[in-house]
Image: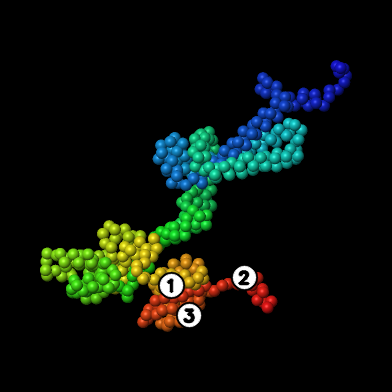
């Protein structure tokens, strides 16, 4: 029934008439159209927020070596990705500017829409704040970043060109905030570099240990990789055969004597000295001795004629450099000397190889570290303290004067020791098992069980 002119309009009609929007004088938007457009715009802004958030994770989680590899492939996305990563500071500013603009715009539009539909004032602000925060956290942060973490490389390739476009669109803001950020960093003493090395040595070690726990690496592979990492930090003194264990021959000895020495010692190559071990003039190989003795053309051939030159290196020489130097000079045995030029020992190519692959035992040779049980080991005196610490998961210290377990025992005792003597250090009982003259040949190390709180409580109650 038609309403009379004197009757007031109903509430729904009044809201529609009041809230109608004249868009540029062309289209009149109804409340329904305003709601649909507002919701659509907010959805687009949430998608953009997710784009920028996931881009940050993907870009800064991608390893530098993978960026180089992708760029070398020649793809446009790979080249764009590298150009962005070449200036990580500007890349970060671009992402942050874009993300903050999107989030602020989203909050402003939501507040305006709520006011339009009658939820103005504090109520509208509260609803907008908590509602948009929930949406952004779920769809603009959490979900996109989780996806980017799981698909770092592929997502970085996809977002590279859109990010480059965003950098051009937002260029005035990006340049301004890039400059301001660098200025603030300089004033406050902060670092202007966003990225450091994408991986550290400690992180590699952690990855190796994790790989063993997850079953990707077995124990031997883990140990080899860890020894490889330690290789650069090892010096010649730590891997050398000490002077007391050296087998050498005098240059005036006969070839027969030299062959006998090689056979008795089990070494194919021996150092040759003149006068004393402090004057090593080179090395001789049993192959040359036998060949020239039996098949040589010169009947009066002497040992001195078969000596090959060798290198003399300081005991502080890094083994990584030493290996390279031995390879370049094609020598398999070098003499280690101290600061006074006195012969301290020798290092062979096998010694350096064992630093990576582990001990290479021959014949009846004993294991350097022999496990009696999980808490007890028998260790040769010349074994490095680092190896003992790793084997028993303990922390025996090294000193400037010693690196071996025998040196540690002498340092703690302060005198010569005898078989059967024991010392204790930080919960580790060390018993001298074998002594040859003044040298400690073997020691037994046992870690004492540390009672837990319950055991201690029970002991107090008893």
Residue found at the far front of this picture: 363
Q: Which residue is mark 2?
A: 452
Crowding at mark 1 (Cα within 10 Å: few <14, some 14-19, many 20+): many
Residue placed at 32% from the left, 66% from the top? 347
Q: Which residue is mark 1?
A: 379
- Which of the two discs, 3 and 1, labels the residue nearer the N terminus? 1
| Earlier sequence position, callout 1 versus callout 2 | 1
Q: Which mark is residue 422?
A: 3
Instruction: Tell me which corner region of the image, top left, top right, bottom left or bottom right, holds residue 441.
Output: bottom left
Location of residue 296 by image quarter: bottom left
Mark 3–mark 2 distance (CA, rounded to whole Å): 26 Å
Q: Is residue 76 left or right of residue 240?
A: right
| Quarter occupied by residue 344 | bottom left
Q: Are marks 3 and 2 in contact (CB under 8 Å)?
A: no
| Identity of the residue drawn at 26% across and 59% down | 330
Q: Nearer the viewer's eye, disc 1 or disc 2?
A: 1
Q: Is residue 337 visible?
A: no
Q: Nearer the viewer, residue 17 or 201?
A: 201
- Disc 3 packing (10 Å; few <14; some 14–19; many ≥20): some
Q: What residue do we see at 34% from left, 67% from top?
A: 362
Give the image's coloring scheme: rainbow
């Amino acid at each position: 029934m038609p309403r009379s002119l004197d009757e007031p309009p109903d509430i729904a009609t009044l809201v529609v008439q009041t809230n109608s929007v004249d868009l540029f004088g062309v289209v009149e938007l109804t409340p329904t159209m305003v709601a649909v457009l507002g919701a659509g715009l907010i959805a687009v802004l949430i998608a953009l927020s997710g784009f920028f958030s996931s881009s940050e994770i993907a870009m800064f989680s991608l390893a530098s070596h993978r960026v180089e590899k992708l760029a070398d492939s020649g793809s446009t996305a790979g080249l764009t990705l590298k150009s962005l990563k070449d200036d990580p500071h500007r890349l970060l500013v671009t992402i942050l500017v874009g993300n903050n603009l999107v989030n602020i715009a989203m909050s402003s539009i939501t507040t305006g829409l709520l006011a339009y539909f009658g939820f103005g004032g504090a109520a509208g602000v509260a609803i907008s704040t908590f509602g948009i925060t929930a949406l952004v956290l779920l769809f603009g942060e959490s979900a996109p970043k989780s996806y980017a973490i799981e698909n770092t490389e592929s997502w970085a390739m996809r977002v590279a060109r859109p990010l480059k476009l965003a950098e051009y669109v937002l260029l005035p803001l990006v340049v301004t905030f890039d400059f301001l950020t660098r200025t603030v960093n300089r004033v406050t003493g902060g670092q202007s570099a966003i990225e450091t090395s994408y991986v550290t040595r400690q992180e590699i070690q952690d990855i190796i240990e994790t790989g063993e726990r997850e079953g990707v690496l077995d124990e031997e592979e883990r140990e080899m990789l860890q020894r490889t990492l330690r290789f650069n930090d090892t010096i010649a003194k730590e891997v050398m055969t000490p002077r007391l264990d050296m087998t050498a021959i005098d240059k005036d000895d006969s070839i027969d004597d030299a062959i006998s020495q090689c056979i008795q010692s089990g070494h194919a190559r021996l150092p040759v000295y003149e006068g004393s071990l402090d004057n090593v003039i080179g090395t001789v190989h049993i192959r040359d001795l036998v060949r020239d003795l039996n098949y040589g053309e010169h009947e009066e051939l002497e040992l001195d004629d078969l000596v090959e030159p060798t290198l003399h290196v300081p005991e502080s020489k890094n083994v990584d450099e030493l290996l390279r130097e031995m390879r370049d000079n094609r020598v398999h045995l070098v003499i280690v000397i101290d600061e006074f030029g006195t012969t301290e020992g020798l290092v062979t190519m096998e010694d350096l190889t064992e630093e990576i692959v582990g001990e290479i035992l021959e014949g009846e040779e004993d294991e350097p570290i022999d496990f009696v049980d999980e808490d007890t080991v028998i260790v040769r005196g010349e074994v490095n303290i680092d190896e003992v610490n790793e084997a028993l998961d303990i922390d025996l210290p090294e000193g400037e004067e010693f690196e071996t377990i025998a040196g540690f025992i002498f340092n703690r005792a302060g005198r010569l020791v005898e078989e059967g003597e024991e010392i204790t250090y930080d919960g580790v009982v060390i018993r001298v098992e074998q002594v040859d003259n003044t040298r400690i040949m073997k020691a037994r190390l046992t870690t004492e069980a540390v009672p837990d709180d319950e055991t201690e409580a029970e002991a107090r109650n008893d």
